[in-house]
Image (cartoon, coloured by chain):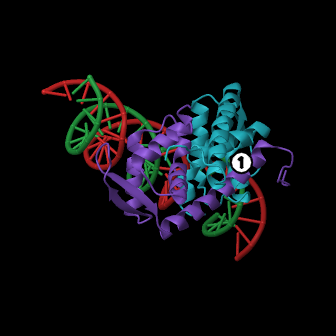
Chain colours: A cyan, B purple, C green, D red
DNA sequence: TTCCACTACTCAGCGTTACTTGGTACCAGT
DNA sequence: ACTGGTACCAAGTAACGCTGAGTAGTGGAA
């Protein structure tokens, strides 16, 4: 993926992480690994942690420290009510964008009359 | 649309404009009006002009000044070969994102085995 | 014991992009 | 002459993801 993806991820990455957390609680390292597994090979580790700090400070998630067998304690994030609301909002915006983009990609019907 | 959309537009807006230009040449004011018409009510005029300057400087579009009946001359932008290439690249990245997002939205099949 | 690899999180500084605000310029109708 | 619609441009700001480096804890290899 080129660096074009970098800009396109803005705003979207947060939605992705919220969506992941809506399935079940997770911690940063785990989320990073999962994303890499899904093909998001360019996402820096630091980016995820910074994002998690942001959504924690906005009260979208609850945090619990859980001791790990193999390293420092994990910070396990759980989606809260506000986070779920934010996730809904994200899906709405995403759907709006996706619809418009799909129309642009399939230029059958042009929504224009003027000239 | 909230300000969440603002961030989500980053990187996407350029693709949208390139897609518009792939249909037919257009000028800034026209593109802005069309976007507003499509529901992108929050996109500032200045944003489009700045974007057009950027893609012109990167050689993605050709520019021609055309006198207008009702105001200053229009700068009509036409998609060039490099622009078309960039647009293809954009669609690839977009498809990648859209697929992953769709999977996350419909949590039937989880693509994970480890734990 | 020392060293390395893996796990797990943190932080400062940077670049890109979209927004805000304001300005320039041209034409038509009153 | 003045107003309003057309059409474009520029400077400053904020948000977000990246880069690159650092801090720790555990367990296995040398």
Which chain letter goes with mark 1? B
Q: Is residue A73 above or below residue B41?
A: below
The residue that appears at 50% across and 52% down in the rendered structure is B17
Give how far across and how far down residue B2 sits, in percent. 55, 31
Depth check: give the residue in front, A115 or B73.
A115
The residue that appears at 40% across and 54% down in the rendered structure is B52
Left or right of residue B80: residue A36: right
Depth check: give the residue in front, A100 or B67.
B67
Quarter assignment of residue B107: top right
Tell me the quarter of the image containing the N terminus of chain A. Answer: bottom right
Depth check: give the residue in front, D14 or A29.
D14
The residue that appears at 74% across and 52% down in the rendered structure is A70
Give how far across and how far down residue A32 sits, in percent. 67, 52
Tell me if I can see residue A71 in this picture. no
Left or right of residue B42: residue B99: right
Give how far across and how far down residue B44 sits, in percent. 42, 38
Q: Is residue C24 above or below residue B54?
A: above
Numbered label tally: 1
Tell me if I can see residue B110 in this picture. yes
Give how far across and how far down residue B50 sits, in percent. 38, 49
Left or right of residue B111: residue B22: left
Label 1 element class? helix
The residue that appears at 61% across and 40% down in the rendered structure is A52
Q: Which residue is mark 1?
A: B101
Left or right of residue B106: residue B72: left
Q: Is residue B2 above or below residue C24?
A: above
């Amino acid at each position: 993926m080129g660096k074009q993806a970098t800009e396109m991820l803005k705003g979207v990455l947060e939605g992705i992480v919220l969506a992941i957390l809506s399935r079940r609680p997770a911690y940063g390292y785990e989320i990073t690994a999962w994303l890499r597994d899904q093909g998001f090979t360019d996402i820096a580790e630091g980016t995820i942690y910074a994002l998690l700090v942001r959504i924690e400070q906005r009260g979208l998630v609850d945090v619990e420290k859980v001791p790990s067998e193999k390293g420092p304690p994990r910070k396990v994030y759980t989606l809260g009510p506000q986070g779920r609301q934010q996730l809904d909002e994200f899906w709405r915006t995403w759907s709006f964008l996706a619809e418009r983009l799909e129309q642009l990609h399939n230029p059958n019907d042009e929504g224009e009359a003027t000239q």
